[in-house]
Amino acid sequence: MNKLADSSWLDFEQQHVWHPYAALQGTLPALPVRSAEGVHILLEDGRRLIDGMASWWSVIHGYNHPVLNAAAKQQLDQMSHVMFGGLTHRPAAELAARLVELTPQPLQSVFFCDSGSVSVEVAIKMAIQYWYALGQPDKQKLLTVRHGYHGDTFGAMSVCDPEGGMHHMFSHLLPQHFFVPAPQARTDAEWVDSEIVPMRDTIERHHNEIAAVILEPIVQGAGGMRVYSPEYLRQVRALCDTHGILLIADEIATGFGRTGKLFACEHAGIAPDILCLGKALTGGYLSMAATLTTEEISRTISTQPPGAFMHGPTFMANPLACSIACASIDLLLDSPWQERIAAIENSMCDKLEPCRALAGLADVRVKGGIGVLELDQPVDMPRITRAFIDRGVWLRPFGKLVYIMPPYIITAAELDHLLSAMVETVKESVRSSGP
Ligand SMILES: *Cc1c(COP(=O)(O)O)cnc(C)c1O
């Protein structure tokens, strides 16, 4: 059945297949993986790595989980897919019921998407169409903070950090939105009211043009792995309410427990008007995302011309993905996830905080199941990747950031191994790049 010989498939792959944020035939070839189990990634050559990345936030229960496998197999025998235009199925209803119940109360309707970036596109379109339906077609701009990351499609790119982002060469094609500096305070204790001034000024000056503020609540992910004070979110919520602006929370990375709350908005006790979910939604099994909104926004869009929401991916509400997502959510809620995240957070604080004193280290940040070491200089990717692998762990730093967000099921011993490997490798790296 195999078309490619065991000795040559990898060569073929390197010549013909793109990887994320990479050159074709790049300098750091991708590692071949045979299988994965629990927190371990098993390489083709037999080496076993502890996964510190949860495959980019998604694999919260670990790989090859019997409960998720069973849900997939059961749904596979019913149907893998059926179009969602004009047809529906129980898995979509079951997943929507869970999402409506778990997310903040005002969020009552669910739009299923096939990826996180698409859910951001949908959120932006919903916000703009809502104001259009209310007879305010001039409200088409978005407002956001620097260091954000919201995806790689054009609408999503337009609200990513304009400098730190990877999208600057497309900037002339992107809609121009409003950006303000990201808050500096990390906790409510550090909060000073002057932090809100740029956001408040921009809203006061431009609220007639602004449809929505879009933010990653509490933790900014791929735009810089930053943590900020819940007070900022509360004040933005209040400003949006005062000035007739919607609030879009992009919880694609933070959702489903990663920050220690089921959703990061809960740290601030606020509800967004539109919520984007993805990544951990299916426990890392399939690409699926969702955009939730309020009854009022859904009704306004649905009852005013053009009377429909104009978006509909081919694989919308894919039954296989919905069934696995239901099983993943049930598994999460039946698990002691709060204790697990708290234990991960404590270990990360113990092991990472002392690194603050290291020469070459700019910052240490820990929030829930996320641990970040920020270096003074960008890492040497081939070299640091090799060092991690030699120590039996899988990490994927970017720029100056070495970070982990392991699967929640990681044991104390595995986490200890992961953190020791992270710290030792970073020490080695800053020593070798130092003066
Ligand atoms: C990953 C991510 C996205 C994009 O999701 P994709 O599934 O990769 O398209 C959007 N927003 C945030 C906050 C993310 O972390």
Image (cartoon, helix red, strand yellow):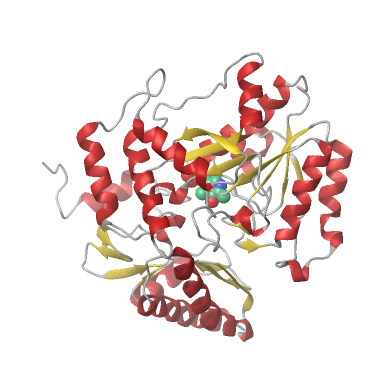
Picture quadrant where residue 7 is located: bottom left
**Please, is residue 216 above or below residue 213 in the view?**
below
**Please, is residue 60 above or below residue 72 in the view?**
below
Name the residue at 58% across, 83% down. Answer: 355
Left or right side of 310 for 59 = left
Q: Position of residue 163 (x, y in %)?
A: 68, 51
Picture quadrant where residue 394 is located: bottom left
Quadrant holding the C terminus: bottom right
Q: Position of residue 71 (x, y in %)?
A: 27, 45
The residue sitting at the left extreme is 1
Q: Position of residue 207 (x, y in %)?
A: 83, 36
Q: Nearer the viewer, residue 86 or 125?
A: 86
Q: Position of residue 392 (x, y in %)?
A: 33, 74
**Please, is residue 336 above or below residue 308 in the view?**
below
Q: Nearer the viewer, residue 5 or 34?
A: 34
Quadrant holding the N terminus: top left
Left or right side of 38 for 387 = right
Does residue 89 appear in this view?
A: yes
Left or right side of 92 for 37 = left
Left or right side of 432 for 17 = left
**Please, is residue 146 above or below residue 287 in the view?**
below
Q: Nearer the viewer, residue 20 or 422?
A: 422
In this rendering, the count of numbered labels is 0
Does residue 432 appear in this view?
A: no
